[in-house]
């Protein structure tokens, strides 16, 4: 029994869906490869480690939750 032929959801290339293929079932092997982590690393962690931004976020949430309506 042959493997089913699928079209990649990203690039549109046809590929055979094999049982041991890593990644997503609707993506070809070249599009299923993991992304380069160096490009997403600093942008994703920049706001998480910023203490001033977290303090401002907490104070804004506190003000919204506990403000008195006049």
Image (cartoon, helix red, strand yellow):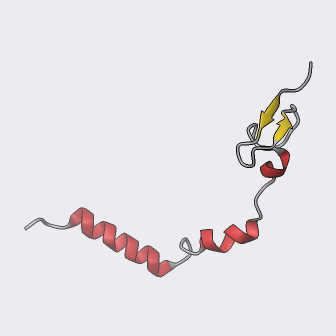
x then y, percent, for residue 2: 91, 23
Q: Is residue 62 shown left or right of residue 48?
A: left
Seen as rendered, the residue at the extreme bottom is 52
x then y, percent, for residue 53: 45, 77
Choose between 51 and 3: the one closer to the eye.
3
Q: Residue at x 32, y 66 (%)?
A: 61
Q: In the figure, residue 9 lies in which quadrant?
A: top right
x then y, percent, for residue 5: 83, 30
Seen as rendered, the residue at the extreme right is 1
Q: In the figure, residue 43 lies in which quadrant?
A: bottom right
Choose between 30 and 54: the one closer to the eye.
30
Q: Residue at x 65, y 74 (%)?
A: 42
x then y, percent, for residue 21: 86, 39
Q: Is residue 42 shown left or right of residue 22?
A: left
Vertical arrangement, residue 5 with respect to residue 38, above or below:
above
Q: Residue at x 37, y 70 (%)?
A: 58
Report the label total. 0
Tell me the quarter of the image containing the N terminus: top right
Tell me the quarter of the image containing the C terminus: bottom left
Q: Is residue 22 shown left or right of residue 49?
A: right
Seen as rendered, the residue at the extreme left is 70
Q: Is residue 70 shown left or right of residue 1?
A: left
Q: In the figure, residue 64 lies in which quadrant?
A: bottom left
């Amino acid at each position: 029994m042959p493997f089913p032929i699928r079209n990649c959801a990203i690039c549109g290339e046809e590929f055979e869906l094999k049982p041991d293929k890593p990644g997503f079932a609707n993506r070809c092997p070249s599009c299923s490869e993991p992304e380069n982590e160096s490009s997403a690393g600093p942008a994703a962690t920049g706001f998480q480690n910023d203490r001033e931004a977290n303090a401002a976020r907490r104070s804004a949430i506190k003000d919204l939750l506990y403000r008195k309506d006049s």
